[in-house]
Amino acid sequence: MQEHSIAINAPDGGGQQVPFTKVHTLVLGSGAAGLNAAVQLFNHGVDDVLVITEGLEMGTSINTGSDKQTYYKLGIYGAEPDSPVDMARALFDGGAMHGDLALAEAASSVRGFMNLVNLGVPFPRDSHGMFVGYKTDHDPRQRATSLGPYTSREMCRALIKEMQRQGTPYREKRLAVELLTIQQEGQKRIAGLLALNTSGGKPVWESYGCENLVFAVGGPGGLYKTSVYPKVHNGAIGLALMAGAKARNLPEAQYGLASIKFRWNVSGSFMQVVPRFISTDQNGGDAAEFMGPFFDAPGGMHSAVFLKGYQWPFDSLKVVGGSSLVDILVYQETVTKGRRVWLDFRGDPQGFSLSGLSEEARIYLERCKATQNTPLKRLLAMNPDAYGLYKANGIDLAAEPLEIAVCAQHNNGGLAGDHWWESENLRGLFCVGEVNGSHGVTRPGGSALNSGQVGSLRAAEYIGAKRTGWSLDLAACQERARAALEALTAWTRRGAGAAKSWQEHLAGLQNRMTRYGAHIRTKEGLARAVEEAREQWRELVGQGCSCKNPAELSSALNVRQLCFAHLVYLSACGYAVASGLGSRGSSLVLSADGRKVSPRLGDEWRFMPEDKSFRAKVLETQAGPDGEVTHAWRACRPLPETDAWFETTWAAYKAGDIYDE
């Protein structure tokens, strides 16, 4: 790693010196995927590495979970057979996923999992050393495992400890604000990035040049008003989209019920104990249970709530007579009627009885010895840690209800990477973790954690095998940094007189995404939202946004990339709906001539069924610097053939040919 300074010719004719750091491989982000990338780069002989992050204790991985946060891997317990191809098929069969990515995620799942085990992550195993598993959603085998609510947090802690033991340097309180790209040898490539050092009272510019950039910035948590992403996590996919990186399947996401005071998924046991759902006015008055009229009998309603524990994400296939009707009723109360919805664990819902539940629900509660006479007592019997989780965060479920909403939870789409997790069109950009769009329409629960570990492992392995040298044109990189710094300096000065603050711009884009680009979508609404988003982007580029003090500069620059990202996401959603895709995954497309969700709901709740022919395609999206966005449907690559001969595969591996395939 080498330190330099470059001069900036500021618009007012002045000048300033900005630190310039040259490093071979730069890792941006410190979630489970970014940390593993740093650890695996060291293991693969790449010794000039630097991690920059807003904070090791920030981000989604270390600040989120669920009642039993799942890690998905190849089945390695007992007598049940499994294979990489079988696991790849489970991933691929969710639709809109490339087969080579599915096989790569399956084939290296044990490597990624055992690396965590060897670092001390205490995944449960029996006295013979077998790692016990269970079935998760969309999982035909018992491939899932868990540490409880904080699986990803414990992963991060183990990886941080190992990274520090290895001596890999890292810099905290850095906010990336622009990716640097150059044309070199007829190809667009990554060259580095600009960042703000926010460790002091006034942010300070920094610039970085690198041969490779491991982009591990997480999902787009900052795009939504109602979000279960931790408040400290915004995501930064907008930086790559602004740099022209190709994206894949951006409309495919997951939304589900979550608490909003303390952001946490209310999946699993929170639903299986069947709490009361209460609606109030904005002041907390006029409290009443509200879901009963939409079900034939109390037992049917309570069984649907129970099933939300298994089927937590909103699923368009489960809205008619299924558990996702619960999400729609919550949405109708909170968004359409402008009320608030709460879970109350202190007393049973109206008409509740164990005998009235479905057989599946009743037997499950009996086997868990959770047949007590209130949801809270059932929760304490089934999963006392779930109660303790909220108690530790200032919410006592024994004394108060829990406010919830339908929230954004995970983006199955993201940037388009190949089977080594390198961007398909921007050389040197390796996209790992949630920011990589490897998933399709549905995915087994916990497969995102596996994907992040596998992707970061494969990116590090590829860099160690093929990208250890230097090819970066350093002079071109520094010139690009200088030009970008001048442009950003001018933009921030324009913001001093802007009519809108960064807070107003942020509220506008988040409200728009939640209203039009989340789980409830319409063709007309998305068309209108795209135009509004494009107009906001033009205004933000032309006028900037105001800040109260220099310390808010980082917030303004973060809103800049979020605004661009929300334009691209809305455009992708609109294109998919206009293509006739219909309702699929975690999105419901409303249409006046569609099928009714329920005879007890109004005609506004008619939806367009899925056109399943699109399951054999992925949606590719690319944005230009002016905010124009293009889209195209591409056929899914099939699952690769796997009947290799040992001697020829061995020879290809020894020769390094596997990295050229």
Image: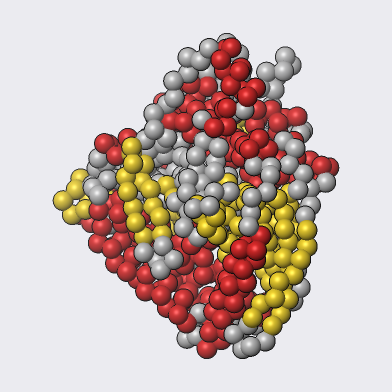
Residue 126 in which image quadrant: top right
In front here: 500 or 417? 417
Residue 250 horizontal/vertical position (percent):
41, 50
At x 79%, y 52%, the residue is 169
Residue 460 horizontal/vertical position (percent):
65, 39
Left-right relation of 24 to 598 = right
In this view, 160 is above or below 613? below
Residue 306 visible in rendering:
no
At x 37%, y 74%, the residue is 535
In this view, 509 is above or below 210? below
In front here: 343 or 621? 621
Residue 251 visible in rendering:
yes
In front here: 660 or 293? 660
At x 68%, y 38%, the residue is 464
Residue 218 horizontal/vertical position (percent):
57, 51
In this view, 323 is above or below 87? below
Left-right relation of 324 to 644 = left
Instruction: For the N terminus, give its image quadrant.
Output: bottom right
Report the label total: 0
Which residue is the extreme one toward the left?
593
In front here: 395 or 466? 466
How was the colour assigned to the protein in this rendering?
A: secondary structure
Left-right relation of 192 to 356 = right
In this view, 374 is above or below 500? above
At x 58%, y 71%, the residue is 484
Residue 76 horizontal/vertical position (percent):
61, 19
